[in-house]
C-alpha cells in the first residue's frame, strides 16, 4: 500500500479505526495506533496507549503530517512504516 492509498482511506474514514503500524528502524518495534471516529469534533486520532495522552486532529492530512513519532511524521517516516492492521483487521485478512 502506498502512502497516498492509506491517506485516501483515512480521508474516506471507512473502516480505519484501530489501525496499527510500527517503524522497522525502531529497536523495540513498538506498535502505534491511529484511527478515525466521526462522532468527534476532531475525529482523527493517534496514540492513547503509545503516545502519552494521545492526539486528536481535524483532518487525515493533519494526522499523517504531525511530527509525533520521535519528532517526525508518518509522511516523513514512510520508508520505515510497516502497516500491520487496518480497522483492527490484519492485512492478510483484507
Image (cartoon, rainbow, N blue to C red):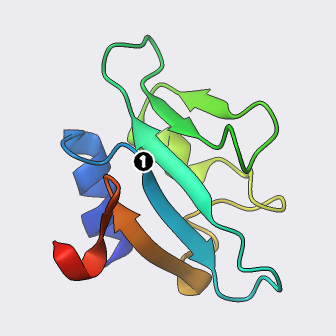
Q: Could you tell me which residue is drawn at 16 percent across and 72 percent down?
A: 94
Residue 93: percent from the left, percent from the top? 19, 75
Pick the quarter of the image with the N terminus.
bottom left
Q: Could you tell me which residue is drawn at 62 percent across and 59 percent down?
A: 32
In the picture, residue 89 is in which quadrant?
bottom left
Number of numbered discs on residues: 1
Residue 57: percent from the left, percent from the top? 54, 29
Residue 42: percent from the left, percent from the top? 48, 19
Q: Is residue 83 left or right of residue 8?
A: right
User: Mark 1 = which residue?
Assistant: 18
Query: Please, is residue 72 above or below residue 78 in the view?
Result: above
Q: Could you tell me which residue is drawn at 33 percent across and 13 percent down?
A: 39
Q: Is residue 28 left or right of residue 90?
A: right
In the picture, residue 46 is in which quadrant?
top right
Sort mark 1 into few (<14), some (14-19) or many (20+) by Cα contacts within 10 Å.
Answer: some
Q: Is residue 32 left or right of residue 50?
A: left
Query: Please, is residue 34 above or below residue 13 in the view?
Result: below
At mark 1, the secondary structure is: loop
Q: Could you tell me which residue is drawn at 30 percent across and 22 percent down?
A: 38
Residue 92: percent from the left, percent from the top? 24, 82
Q: Is residue 89 left or right of residue 44?
A: left
Query: Please, is residue 37 above or below residue 15 in the view?
Result: above
In the picture, residue 73 is in which quadrant?
bottom right
Amino acid at each position: 500500500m502506498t502512502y497516498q492509498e492509506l491517506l485516501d482511506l483515512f480521508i474516506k474514514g471507512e473502516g480505519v479505526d484501530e489501525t496499527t503500524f510500527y517503524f522497522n528502524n525502531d529497536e523495540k518495534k513498538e506498535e502505534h495506533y491511529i484511527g478515525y471516529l466521526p462522532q468527534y469534533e476532531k475525529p482523527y486520532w493517534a496514540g492513547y496507549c503509545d503516545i502519552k495522552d494521545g492526539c486528536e486532529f481535524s483532518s487525515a492530512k493533519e494526522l499523517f503530517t504531525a511530527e509525533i513519532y520521535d519528532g517526525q511524521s508518518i509522511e516523513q517516516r514512510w520508508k520505515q512504516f510497516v502497516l500491520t492492521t487496518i480497522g483492527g483487521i490484519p492485512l492478510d485478512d483484507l
